Image (cartoon, helix red, strand yellow):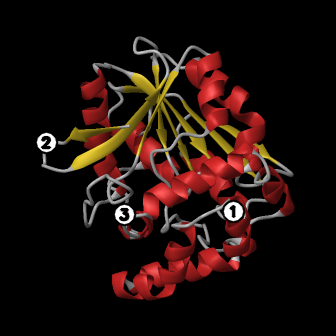
């Protein structure tokens, strides 16, 4: 992992898996998360000749906080990563809370991002015709209610969750997130993926919960770009059993992203939809012009 300096004086924690000369898949982790990479993702990318670049969003792990950031604020940070690597253009993917950040890259810097993959990604909080919280597990409803009440309330409500996930294991993830995990998702936590997910939580929250707080605030505020601006090839995958980002979010995004290739899968959850379809997801993504 490498800390890179940003033009505004902040630093960003970045990790690269794969050959230096390979095309780049830039991955946006979920909320919360951090720079540790998912083994299954790195392997699937390598099978397609890609190197996987992961990073910790501002406020997570060793990445400097950027208070008040909106979703669009991630774009100059991602351009700084590409410039640091000497990469002119890449493809990008975002899972869950990372989905909007991937879309921001496609909308605001299409000259640098040739394709976008949204994996169980969140829709805008103020999306017309969408009840943002409907279908979410109890823990997420409580989290977003606290977010809408402001920073002090968020810290009060989320203190225990931050502490638990800062010491995450696959088992205590199931315990602390029980209302968010249908059986199809619990099943995948018993293998390597559970260890990788726990490692991301631990790294992201070991310093503070600031990155998680700032992610949540950014998600419920205007994102800083319009979905109509996303004109690069975009793929969307969503599972019907998802209790973190309900199926209705995927359906809404499918109806509002220009030219999106939508895969709305019945019987899959927030985690299983990605683990079960990653090869197809990345194959479709790299078919985009880069």
Q: Which residue shows up at 44% across the image and 68% down it?
A: 216
Q: Indicate the quadrant where residue 53 lies.
A: top left
Which residue is at the far top?
21
Q: CA distance from mark 2 to mark 1?
A: 37 Å
Residue 151 located left or right of residue 34: left
Residue closer to the observer: 56 or 118: 56
Helix, strand or loop under label 2: loop
Q: CA distance from mark 2 to mark 3?
A: 24 Å
Q: Which residue shows up at 59% across the image and 50% down it?
A: 253
The residue indicated by pointer 3 is: 222
The percent position of residue 98, horizontal first and vertical second, equals 49, 50
The residue indicated by pointer 2 is: 7
The percent position of residue 117, horizontal first and vertical second, equals 56, 36
Residue 186 located left or right of residue 166: right
Q: Which numbered disc flags the more N-terminal residue, 3 or 1?
A: 3
In this rendering, is residue 229 above or below 149? above
The percent position of residue 261, horizontal first and vertical second, equals 64, 34
In this rendering, is residue 188 above or below 3? below
Q: Which numbered disc flags the more N-terminal residue, 2 or 1?
A: 2
- Quarter the C terminus occupies: top left
């Amino acid at each position: 992992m490498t800390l890179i300096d940003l033009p505004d004086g902040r630093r960003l924690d970045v990790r690269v898996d794969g050959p230096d000369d390979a095309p780049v898949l830039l991955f946006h982790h979920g909320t919360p998360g951090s720079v540790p990479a998912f083994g299954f993702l790195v392997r699937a990318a390598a099978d397609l000749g890609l190197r996987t670049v992961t990073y910790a969003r501002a406020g997570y792990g060793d990445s400097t906080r950027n208070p008040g950031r909106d979703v669009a604020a991630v774009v100059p940070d991602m351009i700084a990563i590409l410039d640091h690597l000497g990469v002119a253009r890449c493809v990008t993917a975002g899972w869950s809370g990372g989905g909007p950040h991937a879309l921001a890259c496609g909308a605001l810097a299409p000259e640098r991002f040739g394709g976008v993959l949204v994996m169980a990604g969140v829709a805008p909080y103020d999306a017309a015709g969408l009840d943002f919280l409907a279908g979410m597990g109890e823990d997420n409803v409580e989290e977003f209610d606290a977010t809408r009440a402001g920073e002090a309330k968020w810290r009060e409500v989320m203190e225990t969750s931050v502490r638990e996930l800062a010491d995450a294991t696959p088992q205590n993830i199931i315990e602390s997130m029980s209302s968010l995990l249908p059986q199809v998702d619990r099943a995948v936590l018993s293998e390597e993926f559970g260890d990788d997910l726990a490692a991301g939580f631990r790294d992201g929250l070991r310093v503070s919960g600031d990155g998680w707080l700032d992610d949540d605030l950014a998600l419920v505020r205007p994102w800083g770009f319009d979905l109509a601006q996303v004109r690069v090839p975009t793929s969307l995958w969503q599972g019907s059993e998802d209790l973190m980002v309900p199926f209705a979010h995927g359906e809404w995004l499918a109806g509002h992203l220009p030219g999106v290739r939508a895969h709305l899968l019945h019987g899959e959850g927030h985690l299983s939809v990605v683990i079960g379809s990653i090869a197809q997801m990345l194959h479709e993504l790299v078919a985009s012009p880069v």
